[in-house]
Amino acid sequence: MNATDSDGLSFVRERQEQMEGERLSPLATLSTNTKGRLIPEPLDPLRTEFQRDRDRIIHTNAFRRLKHKTQVFVAPIGDHFVTRLTHTLEVTQIARTIARALRLNEDLVEAAALGHDVGHTPFGHIGEQVLDSIHPGGFRHNEQSLRTIDLLEKDGAGLNLTSETREAVLHHSKPRGDFLNAADLDALTLEAQVVRVSDAIAYLAHDIGDAIRAGVLSESDLPVDAREVLGTRHSQRLDSMVRDVVTTSWACAGYDLSASDGTRPRLNLSPQVNSVVTKLREFMFDNVYMPAGQGPEGENARLVVEFLYNYFINHPGEIPERYFEHKDPVDLIALDYIAGMTDQFALHTAEGLKPGITSDVFIGRV
């Protein structure tokens, strides 16, 4: 009897594990088949291993800070623009919907979706671009999310999550172009693929809404075939993409095993929707994501991140002691500290170190 069985509650977890085996797809990832944690731990009496991952992520400081991190638009005027936290919640719900429809492990996709962006920088992709350009090792927010989970949370102890959740977090990021043809998909669980595609569905839908709200786009600016195939409202676009993933991926999730050619199963979109989504992503990169950092607020955000990085490299004694737990190089410690900042904290810190660095557009936020 292990330590958690002595309280007599382990039957709760065991019943859930049994239900997974009975109701999930033959190709779903069962919590009893996890590859485990970096540091072995006793089983929990009430929760499966992936449920424990979910709970550990949602109670972290890194997760809480997402509410004050930019998604796309820096310093937007209005209460209804998406933040990194609301984006994360939308990704999570979309992923759960797809996983439940395909009878995949909903707990695993929930855990990974909740944790996929905990390493993202302040000021969204602007902050990521600056750190990638000036840090010798480059910067990728998906890698930083895993580093946050493994090494930075709990004052350097990390969360000790399962291999499957960590894999899904690391591989959620997608290149430009047709991300469904990426080579690394062959090694991913179906649940990791659900998180990956759900992230794209979520940000395409809500970023269009924010761009229209900000006056950057109008509905008529969107590609004609995107409006014809996906619809002209936020809810229509979401519904069209989610339904297409479920319909097209039904066989690969294990319901038509005779269709398998022996390769690792993949989630997919129909050729028509995949083509439209790829074109729409490229349109958004060219007309929203790349231009988003070119205005005065974007330029000031770049200046703030670059200043903070250079300052803390030269003044490491001003970085909180907990970031030195693993004795990493100073430039990496500075990167960890800055990547974890919220927009407001980055602005407040920079203004305190160099008064006047914050532009007028940010004054009310410092």
Image (spheres, rainbow, N blue to C red):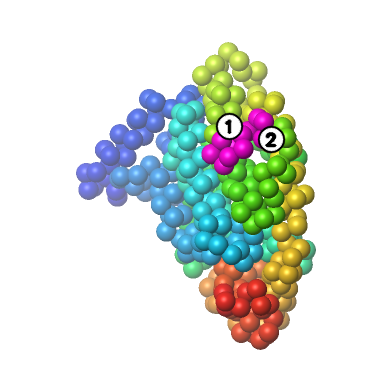
Depth check, front residue: 311 or 21:
311
Magenta highlight on residue 232: yes
Quarter of the rendering containing residue 301: bottom right
Depth check, front residue: 366 or 165:
366
Q: Is residue 13 placed above or below 156 in the rendered structure? A: above
Q: Residue tagged by mark 1?
A: 240
The residue under the point 71% across, 66% down is 298
Q: Which mark is residue 226?
A: 2
In the picture as drawn, the residue positioned furthest to the top comes out as 258
Give the amino acid at mark 1.
Answer: Ser
CB of mark 2 within 8 Å of CB of mark 1?
A: no
The residue under the point 61% across, 57% down is 71
- Left or right side of 260 for 51: left
Magenta highlight on residue 361: no
Q: Which part of the image, by quadrant, shows the N terminus?
A: top left
Q: Does dot 1 land on a helix, a strand or a loop?
A: helix
Q: Which residues are magenta?
A: 226-237
The residue under the point 26% across, 38% down is 11
Q: Residues within 10 Å of mark 2 (few under 14, many from 20)?
A: some
Residue 364 x, y percent position in the rendering: 57, 76
Work out whether mark 2 precedes mark 1 in sequence or the reverse, and give the earlier one: 2
Depth check, front residue: 20 or 244:
244
